[in-house]
Image (cartoon, rainbow, N blue to C red):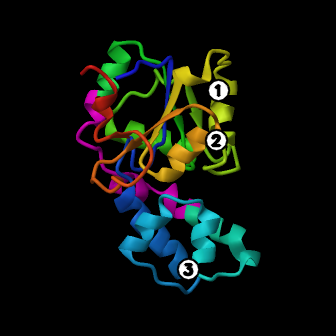
Amino acid sequence: MKKYKLYLFDFDGTLFNTYPALCMVYKMAFKAFGVEVSDEEVRTFSREPIPDSYQRKGLDMKYFWDFVKVINYYLNGEESVNLTEVFEDTVKFHDYVKKNNIQIGIVTSNNIPHVKDIYKAKGIDCSHFAVFVGNQEAQTPKPDPLPILTALKMVNYDGDLMDVVYIGDSPNDALAAKNAKIDAYLLDRHNEYADQPYKIIHSLLDLFDY
């Protein structure tokens, strides 16, 4: 496996299993607007920008920012943190990158205070991360390259872009990396992406000679 100078990671579904929490968040938010959503719909919503999910359910864009406020209310709550699960490879991955001084960062559509709350609640150290970029640091969502480019700017990266890689669990993540002209790996824990034209891994540990 190629070694990179900087490894950037999506958060939801990549570093932590936030799907149980997102089921609660999206169901409660859409319910507040008179719409019911299924677990399977939430899986789709978790891998696309919020405006796409909102419009998919036929809601009026006039009230979109009210919807976002409701999303954030439930997302930032204690129940959301408690429902988030640690993937089997998460702890080993974090121990490995810290021990080997591998430069890593998070680029997510989530908000960073919530991400750090999850790390704290699960007892996993994230102090060695070089950069955190969330929906406040870069408000244009993936697959736009802005979140990744913002991360590179924040760490003052001036090396070869092909020495940077972005890892996520959605084709949108890989497309964002392509748009930013960096390398990409699509994390496919459930063998969903055999037809995707991106490099595939099945565990975070596949990135290294673990």
Task: Look at the image and tell me in which quarter the N terminus lies.
Answer: top left
Q: Tell me what residue is drawn at x 57 percent, y 31 percent.
A: 182
Q: Position of residue 198 (x, y in %)?
A: 44, 43
Q: Tell me what residue is drawn at x 64 percent, y 66 percent.
A: 51
Q: In screen coordinates, is 22 left or right of 89?
A: right
Tag in front: 2 or 3 = 2
Res. 151 image quadrant? top right
Q: Tell me what residue is drawn at x 28 percent, y 53 percent.
A: 191
Q: Which residues are magenta?
A: 72-92
- Marks 2/1 in contact by CB < 8 Å: the verdict is no
Q: In screen coordinates, is 101 left or right of 206?
A: right
Magenta span contains residue 74: yes
Res. 178 image quadrant? top right
Residue, disc 3:
32
Magenta span contains residue 101: no
- The secondary structure type at the circle numbered 3 is helix
Q: Can you say whether 192 is above or below 86 in the image?
A: below
**Of pointers 2 and 3, the one earlier in the residue sequence:** 3
Between 64 and 188, the one lying in front of the other is 188
CA–CA distance between discs 2 and 3?
35 Å
Task: Look at the image and tell me in which quarter the C terminus lies.
Answer: top left
Residue 152 numbered tag: 1
